[in-house]
Amino acid sequence: MIGAPTNSPVLDENGLVQYIVHRVQDVTDFMRLKLHESEQANLSSELRSRADRIEAELFLRGQELADARRLAADLELSHRALRKSELRYRRLFEGARDGILIVNHEGRFVDVNESLCRILKTTRERLIDAHFSEFIPSELASDAQTAFLKLRNDWSTPIEFPFRAVDGSIVELEWTSSSKYLPGLYFCACRDVTERKSMQATSVRLVAIVESSADAIIGEDLDGRILTWNRGAERIFGYTAEEVLDRHISLLAAPDGFDEMTGILKRIGRGEHADHYETKRCRKDGEIIDVSLTVSPVRDGSGQIIGASKIARDITERERTAEALRSTNAALSRANADLEQVAYSASHDLQEPLRTVVVYSQMLQKKYGEKLDSQADEYIGYTVDAARRMEQLLKDLLACLRATDGRDAQVVRVDAKEAVGHAIANLQAAIEESGASITYTEFPRVMIDPVHLQQIFQNLIGNAIKYRARSDRVFL
């Protein structure tokens, strides 16, 4: 029981406390009720507090959920952007004309594009995880490490280093590299410069050819302004390149030759050529020289004619020689004509004495044959035979002179063996005197003037007798 005591004092007439009345009231139920109300209030307060905490928690969870939703949306946007960026990168990566490869720190290929596959003539599967040293030409293995170390340390400066393709061919490559955007990896790009280096080598060779040419090789625009001038031009015309570049080509014109030069430039502008055109030009010292010109149009990459290329050869000495030769030939022609006339007269006039020798020898043989011994008769026979051959030779000489002039040429089928026999008979005295032995093989029948063929063999045998070695044998 819970009591609620009450004390009341009782006073006397003097106001003093005589005694105290003590009362006790049972308040158990009341206290119970008050306690219950307190507990209810505490519970309500706790419930309200819990509700507030739950509400706050729900608010926070709502905020987190909203943040999560925003994050998910951002992630989705990021994923889309990443996929778009990756697609763009892959398109750039695969669409690049240069070969691109990503190499790890071990030197192995992590990724390559199609251009590199084309350059190395193989597939992506063959290249992925392959070591770059597999494609270094064996003769350059010692230089590779130095070259690529230089590229890694100074990626802004390209290097040139060849790779060996899978088919064994050497591909000249220009390299750039960077690890700035790929930690732990190296982004390398290479460009096939094989054609460019070949063109450079060709250009160097062409320059060397032009500079070493003995001919003058001159380049000019369509206005006639000199653009190039080689050493041959310096030698032929006497001007150095510094003296003529940017000056008009008429600098080399001979007197009254300006119109000719402008005419050639107009022809070149129309796309025409001037091949081996002989004209005159003026040197620095004023000497007029003969030149042979070949002029061709020069075109740019689009085919437009932008100038002219001239090759000039100094033919002054040749012209002088030709003129001297023409003079000599004219003198020889006159001398040959005179000699021919003498030969005609001599061959005609000598036939009569020969006929006299033959006739009187035959008369001597006929009238005194019985009085002479056999040896004298033989000697007379030799005399008659030689005179007749001499007469035939004179006739042949006349025929030869006519054939040389184009008169009475007789081209017939001739037995070459018979012509050799006649030539030996005409040279019998020289053969006996030299002690030479003439032998010959079979000869065909040929189409020729018989007199010419006999003279050929006669000259050949005569020279062989005269200039033979120690042996007496002459073989045809």
Image (cartoon, rainbow, N blue to C red):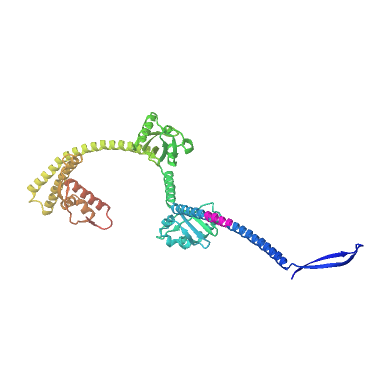
Let me know if residue 349 is in the magenta part: no
Give the answer, above or below, for where 4 lies relative to 237: below
Check the picture and name the quadrant holding the N terminus.
bottom right
Residue 216 in sight: yes
Give the answer, above or below, for where 1 lies relative to 221: below
Check the picture and name the quadrant holding the C terminus.
bottom left
Magenta span: predominant SS is helix
Looking at the rendering, which quadrant does residue 469 occupy? bottom left
Give the answer, above or below, for where 132 lies relative to 352: below
Give the residue at the far top of this rendering: 256
Q: Residue at x 63, y 58 (%)?
A: 52
Let me know if residue 66 is in the magenta part: yes
Q: Residue at x 68, y 62 (%)?
A: 41
> Left or right: where does residue 247 sit relative to residue 331?
right
Q: Residue at x 13, y 53 (%)?
A: 375
Q: Residue 88 appears at what percent x and percent y? A: 47, 52
In this orientation, which residue lies closer to the viewer: 39 or 337?
39
In this orientation, which residue lies closer to the viewer: 276 or 96?
96
In this orientation, which residue lies closer to the viewer: 338 or 293?
293
> Left or right: where does residue 447 sit relative to residue 254?
left
Looking at the rendering, which quadrant does residue 309 occupy? top left
In this orientation, which residue lies closer to the viewer: 405 or 386?
405
Give the residue at the far bottom of this rendering: 1
Q: Residue 190 appears at what percent x and percent y? A: 47, 54
> Left or right: where does residue 319 sit relative to residue 286?
left
In the rendered picture of this protein, how many numbered marks are placed on residues?
A: 0
Q: Which residues are magenta?
A: 62-74
Give the residue at the far front of this rendering: 13
Q: Residue 226 appears at what percent x and percent y? A: 44, 36
Residue 193 in sight: no
Q: Residue 305 appears at what percent x and percent y? A: 38, 37
